[in-house]
Amino acid sequence: MAVCFGMNAAAVDYIVKGTAEGHDGTTVYLRDYNDRCMIDSAIIVNGHFEIKGKYGRDAYVRVEFEREYANIVLSDGITEIDFASHGPKNGSTANQTLNDYTEYETSFFKAYSDSVEAMKLRYPDKNDFLREVKACGDRNRSLYRAKIDSIFNNNLDNGVCEVLLMEYNHLLTPDEWEKLYATFTDRIRNLKSTEEYNRKFMSMKRTAVGQPFIDIKGKDMQGNPASLSDYVGHGKYVLVDFWASWCGPCIQEATETIMPLYEKYKNDDRLVILSVATWDKFENSTKAIAKHGYQWSQLLDTGMKPMEEYGFDGIPQIMLFGPDGTILQRDLRGVSITNSVEEALKPENR
């Protein structure tokens, strides 16, 4: 188990306490989200616990035991935990800001979800629905970005900024990240999580639409060495589905979208469909392929390399490559997969 060390001038003297009735003898852990390591721990006694110590910065941390957790900013003084709301019950100004942001985030995304549900009724045609959802998403993204920018800029010297870095990681384009990264203080720039996010965005930029593919090595269904370059860059369009056997949305996308596409184009020599098993064990991938009846080409046992090279941290990630290996589309889902393939195969686009 990794343990955090290190002190500096911005060290905090913290007391984290809470109630956990019925769990006497259980250990409560305090972990740093940035380093993914343990800071401290305490035993629950008479339904209560208290973790007291000193740490190198007012970090964004997770307090957890068994299946219970709460997220707080580790601050000077006493912070009381509320496991029901997964946050601080009381504490520093930074923790109040964290609570305010969490409430805003919850209400914002509920309103967005409600809007999407209303659109399902208003637009029965799937293409019309997806068009309206995208337009709504674009509008809401701008509003959400403005809000978190405001909070971020007012909390550069405390752990709230670390919370919002996680949001930026999912929200920004590579160009937007570069502009934001240039404004970071040393405190933010030197975080391990910032370094990881920066590598991801640089990978996204290297593999943006219009860039050449990057090769990935793995195995074929028989366990023999194989590579992405065995399929991409040989004069055909290649639809690549990065997936894993444990990923429910991956199975759903393959069954509902990729399987019908394969049946439609399996005898068309202009198109190859390839699934690349990512972050998955070889034997688990082969079992899932047999179970679900996937008939198209497979590249297995690639580990984390696709995510590292192509800069994505969620699957399925579906991309379309051109005949020369150029990336034509990425982040495809649902009907956009079918539309992209059909558009590429039009006679005038050959």
Image (cartoon, rainbow, N blue to C red):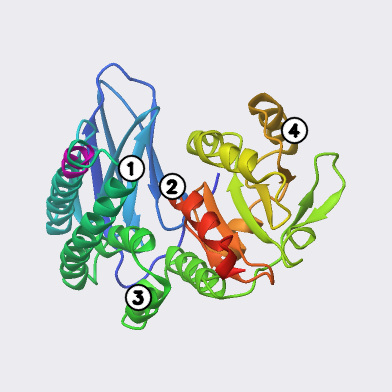
x, y percent for residue 197: 45, 66
- The residue located at (50%, 49%) in the rendering is 338
Which tag, 4 or 2, sits closer to the chain's start? Answer: 4
Q: Circle 2 is placed at which residue position? A: 335
Q: In the structure shown, which secondary structural element does the residue marked by tag 2 occupy? A: helix
CB-based contact (under 8 Å), mark 2 and mark 1? yes
Using a 10 Å C-alpha cutoff, classify the residue at mark 2 as few (fewer than 14 neighbours), some (14 to 19) or many (20 or more). Answer: few
Establish if 185 lies above or below 229: below
Q: Residue 176 carries which label?
A: 3
| CB under 8 Å between discs 3 and 4 | no
Q: Could you tell me the amino acid type at mark 1? A: Lys
Distance of mark 3 from mark 4, alpha carbons?
Answer: 40 Å
Looking at the figure, which quarter contains the N terminus? top right
- Element at label 3: helix
Question: Dot 4: few (<14), some (14–19), or many (≥20) neighbours within 10 Å?
Answer: some
In this picture, residue 99 sits left or right of residue 160: left
Disc number lying in front (4 or 1) = 1
Q: Which dot, 1 or 3, sits closer to the camera? A: 1
- Residue type at tag 4: Glu
> Residue 126 shows which numbered tag?
1
Amino acid marked by disc 3: Glu
Judge by depth and name the residue closer to the eye, 184 or 10.
184
- Between disc 2 and disc 1, whose residue precedes? 1
Instruction: Please name the amino acid that badge 2 sits on.
Output: Val
Secondary structure beneath disc 4?
helix
Q: How far apart are marks 2 and 3 (CA)?
A: 27 Å
Mark linked to residue 283: 4
User: Cα distance, mark 4 to mark 1?
Assistant: 36 Å
Q: Furthest residue to the front?
A: 347
Earlier in the chain: of badge 4 and badge 1, it is 1
**Residue interval drawn in magenta:** 114-120
Q: In this view, does 79 lie above or below 290?
A: below
